[in-house]
Amino acid sequence: MTVVEHSPQIGKKILISGGGRCNFTNLHTRPENFLSADPLFCRPLLARYRPADFVATVKRYRIAFHEKHKGQLFCDGSSQQIIDMLRAECDTGRVAWRMPCKVERISRKGTSFQVTTDTGEFEAKRVVIATGGLSIPKLGASDFGLRVAREFGLAIVEPRPALVPLTFDAQQWHPFAELSGISLEVRARCGDGCFDEDLLFTHRGLSGPAILQISSHWTPGAPISLDLAPSHPGELLDALLLDHKTRSRLQMDTVLATLLPKRLAKGWLDLVGVPSDRRAAEVADGVLRGLAASLHAWSLVPDGSEGWRKAEVMRGGVSTQALSQATLECKEVPGLYFIGEVVDVTGWLGGYNFQWAWASGFAAGQAIAGA
């Protein structure tokens, strides 16, 4: 087996992941954590190679790791440990390397494939496309995998950036730009997606895990809904604000700062027209209830995203209808396989996309080894 890598350095995306510590899987991986035109496609593949299988390899190489948040596993040390582990596994399997080596074209030659590169040509009985998606082009991402799919007549689900910060019209966002840097836990909703995670205000819009998650569900023109006080659902927030009215002499900015970061509390009061220096006792019950409702249902429409340069993954890709659910081999092009991010299977934030890479790679590898 030969790995052809266009970059002089392998695993660049692994290297930067998880803040340099590689969120290499998620213990809670389920098919429900993935988005695809065919939501059931990934089920048997994820069942055949589970997080525990990858963790077993990590343990075998004595790489220390920890669970950080909601099943997310990170190296205690560096992402480089995972890259070194994968390289060592390739060496054990007597894998040959061609790098840096740019593939220029892949074509059929009888029952084999002709692979044309910038260092020469060679033939292969089987070809596995593991090129990733379009996200973070500065790391070398390209549309090569999608171009190969199109050349062989495979359908493509329109690619778009996912796990990406969302942006807003500058004029619309002007009241919030000065809140850049503020972070808080929210409940974010869009379409069929709902996530309780942290939100981060930026100069151009919104980021943080809550927004990255919901961005995979967002389509241009659609609103997103944010609950800025998810820990006080329903009438609990009404009751809290009304209790302050009867029991304290605090000003509204101080009252709201018990729920939100101080700068956001003042900015929100300005937005809804409640004087921040007015005492809660002086505010009408209806206004307090309206304030509570506004915190639970902030609806806004992004005008775009930060695009491929900041997207962590690509949503869309090679249609799963073109691939075997067991092996990821092309149904109409025997010997050609597509795995990982280039396929229309996109995971949530938190190690799920790496687990899909391992699981899909395992399926293709087992099929080729047994052929």
Image (cartoon, rainbow, N blue to C red):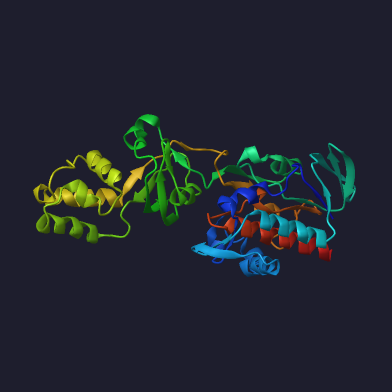
Residue reaching furthest to the top: 171
Along the horizontal axis of the image, is 361 left or right of 282? Answer: right
Q: In this rendering, is residue 182 above or below 203?
A: below
* Residue at point 31%, 35% (across, down): 175
Quadrant assignment, res 107? top right
Quadrant position of the N terminus in the picture? bottom right
The C terminus lies in which quarter of the figure?
A: bottom right
Along the line of sight, the residue nearer the viewer: 303 or 239:
239
Q: Residue 197 vs residue 144: left or right?
A: left
Q: Residue drawn at (23%, 57%), measured in percent from left and top? A: 237
Q: Position of residue 288 (x, y in %)?
A: 17, 50
| Residue 126 visible in rendering | yes
Q: Horizontal and vertical percent for residue 62?
A: 67, 67
Residue 29 is at least partly visible in this image: no
Name the residue: 79% across, 41% down: 100
Q: Is residue 244 left or right of residue 171?
A: left
Who is closer to the viewer here, 339 or 16?
A: 16
329 relative to 176, above or below: below
